[in-house]
Amino acid sequence: MPQCYSSKDAGLPAFYTSTTSSLQRFNNYKLILKACLVSGYGTRPAAGWTLIDEGDQYLVLRNAAGNYVSITSGYYVVNTNLQFHGVFRVFLHATYTGMGANGIPQGQGVVSGTSGSTTLPVLFGTDLFYWNTNTRWIMVADSRTFIFTIAAYTGATSGTGLDTASGVGTLYVGDDLGGNHIAAGGNRQSGINTPQLALYFDRIAFTTLRNPRTGLLVDTAGITAFLDGSYADAAVISNHVSSSGISILNPGSITDMLSLEMGQVRWSGGGAPQPGLRGIRRENLMSRYYSNLVRRQLEGASTTVDYTSENILNFTPLSDGYCYLPLMAQTGGRCALITTDNPAYW
């Protein structure tokens, strides 16, 4: 049964909120992941992951399926600016034997991104996280998968600004519906050109531990992978696409969604189509809408009501007792997906 966690919950650990950059930026991410996935907090039980190793600049976790994820501070890459503690690299691996001095985990099949090994790693996070006025985060997780959303807003953002702000994104890590160990979300690049990344949810920011066609570790070989997206034009094949490169539907009238057709968000690797992501679905009638319009449709809100950075990530159950939230990320490559704790979709 997936659990819901939020920055508005009681009983959370104390977080670093100063505007002064420091190692504590990265420690905030560790605190959240450990509290939600490993230890629990307040009245919230842990999702059921295992803490394998931890250092000042890294965290290694294992899910119930026995697969590993490591996050390591961006300061390993750019050690001349403490702001880079606000971003981290995401690695998947089949075993773990230790953390390298370069912030790359040691073990079998260590991979980040689709280019093979760590050639073009995927990064997540932003130096803006947790000290901006309206910063929010949520997580939906069980023992095999977590979906972590951050929204580092500077103020009460609303409208289209919800989807184009720097430091707003979603990171998916763990099993898909077919048992593949994958990660999706972030920004892929060889180095780190800024501590305030634009965070996408597309086929560029994607990692799979194994080639689903052969069952072999991707390792250094790399893989061609595609993640389902409703507005993936030619540019998405090789680059992240900003909002200027896609077509977004105008607000128009809000449809009162009396029912949802929650289709799978699928991916393909090595030419082999795979089952969908766990806990993330899509309703085609909402494709290519901004996040605030998705939430307004989900809840049947009138056109005069808008969602802002303060309330768009509130866990508000619908009539079936479960929560459905717009998946937050940079507009290019987001395709109006929906995150839910409904166990039928896990």
Image (cartoon, rainbow, N blue to C red):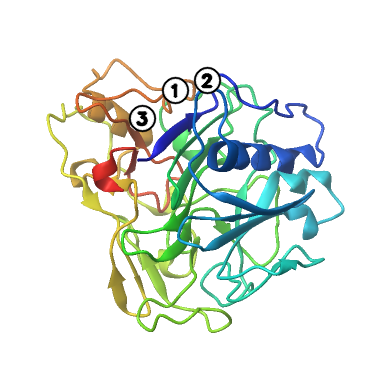
Q: How far across and down, in percent of the image, does residue 65 sit? A: 45, 60
What amino acid type is highlighted by mark number 2?
Ala
Mark 1 → mark 2, Cα distance in angstroms: 6 Å
Left or right for 275, reference 154: left
Which residue sits at x=67%, y=36%?
Answer: 128
What amino acid type is highlighted by mark number 3?
Asn
Secondary structure beneath dot 3 equals: helix
Q: Is residue 205 visible?
A: yes
Left or right for 185, reference 2: right
Q: How far across and down, in percent of the image, does residue 276 sit? A: 30, 58
The disc at residue 308 is: 1
**The quadrant where residue 305 appears:** top left
- The answer to whether the residue labelled 1 contacts the one labelled 2, judged by CB atoms less than 8 Å apart, is yes
Q: How far across and down, in percent of the image, does residue 54 sit? A: 73, 51
Provide the residue designation for mark 2. Answer: 156
What amino acid type is highlighted by mark number 1?
Thr
Mark 2 → mark 3, Cα distance in angstroms: 13 Å
- The answer to whether the residue labelled 1 contacts the one labelled 3, judged by CB atoms less than 8 Å apart, is yes
Provide the residue designation for mark 3. Answer: 292
